[in-house]
Image: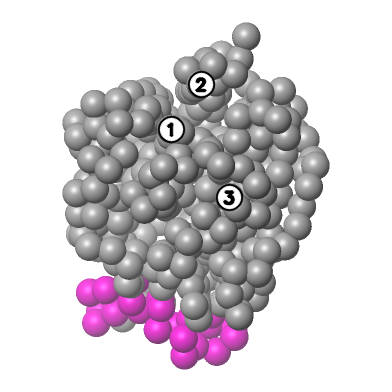
Amino acid sequence: MNTLFPEIKPFNERFLSVSSIHTLCVAQYGNPNGIPVIILHGGPGGARSPRLTQLFDPKHYHMIAFDQRGCGLSTPYGELRDNNAQALIDDIDAVRAFVGVEQWLVCGGSWGAQLGLRYAFRYTKDVTGFILRSPFLGRRQDIDWRFSPNGGCAQIFPDHYSDFCQRLNSTQLKDPVQAYCDCFERGSEFEQLAAAQQWSIWKGSLSHLLPPKVAKERFGLGKKSMALARIESYYYSNHCFMADNHIIDNIDKVSHLSCILVHGRYDMVCKLEGSQMIAQHWSNCQLQIVPGAGHSSSEIGIIDALIQSTNTMADWLGKRV
């Protein structure tokens, strides 16, 4: 069973201005002469986690990670202006030029996997391959699955869903995502903070095969939850700024590249059906279904599969002996 590599500090951390409003925090880890890999965090609005760099052998990989617009150490915090998927896609290319690499491996989970694919659809020549976990396809059915009172998550976790919807009236329940967006736009500071905590607790409760007993303490942290809830609900209310079946419809643009795709069998946040569909349309994609695992990258089986994937990809790229 593979375990995380030791935690390391970035060897370089700088700020990159990408618009008149937004500045991104960009960090580099590992071997500057190793295999370049961009690590895209989830959310949107989730911020980077140094723990994700522990999935890569630091002797062989040059890891690049950044906080997307409005979250983490990027500024301004929680900002929705000039914040959309196309901007984030162009930001990735700006980061590539900023750190001075010509091509890199794309790695991301959930929203980060979707963003990585959309980036590669546009900047295909700059990508050497993919390691993806539990991609969020962003279709209407995927959003309904997680947020609709008739969705799968509400049916399997009705107690947690009741908490998530306790502030919503019958009209708002028809579109909970929009109701939360309206709160972040017009609610008082207290109402916004309470809504952000509840949004984040709901997502956190779904992320593990066995929901953490301390979900409220772990996921309901004030400032941390605000960017996730505010930005994520905004993106979802705008259908992730793409057509409903955009990911599957464009897979042919990257089908010549190799992809290792990891998905927990019991993932409630992102349906396994989505990864199965990607693999069916992508001959160079290897789908590994992890038994006894949910959505979180911190689950033992997911960690094992991802580290196996990063080692395998290093072998494929000829950079590991």
Crowd around label 3: few <14 · some 14–19 · many ≥20 (10 Å): some
Residue 147, given in percent of the width and then of the height, sits at 31, 61
Q: Secondary structure at mark 3?
A: helix
Q: Secondary structure at mark 2?
A: loop
Q: Which residues are magenta?
A: 170-193
The residue depicted at 72 percent of the width and 39 percent of the height is 29
Q: Quadrant of residue 283?
A: top left
Q: Which residue is mark 3?
A: 96
* Mark closer to the chain start, 3 or 1: 3
Q: Is residue 136 visible?
A: no
What is the three-letter code of the residue carrying label 2?
Leu
What is the three-letter code of the residue carrying label 1?
Gly
Closer to us: 27 or 126: 126
For the residues bearing labels 3 and 1, Cβ distance under 8 angstroms: no
Residue 197, given in percent of the width and then of the height, sits at 55, 67
Q: Quadrant of residue 260?
A: top left
Q: Which residue is mark 1?
A: 129
Residue 149, given in percent of the width and then of the height, sits at 25, 63
Q: Which residue is mark 2?
A: 317
The residue depicted at 41 percent of the width and 65 percent of the height is 86
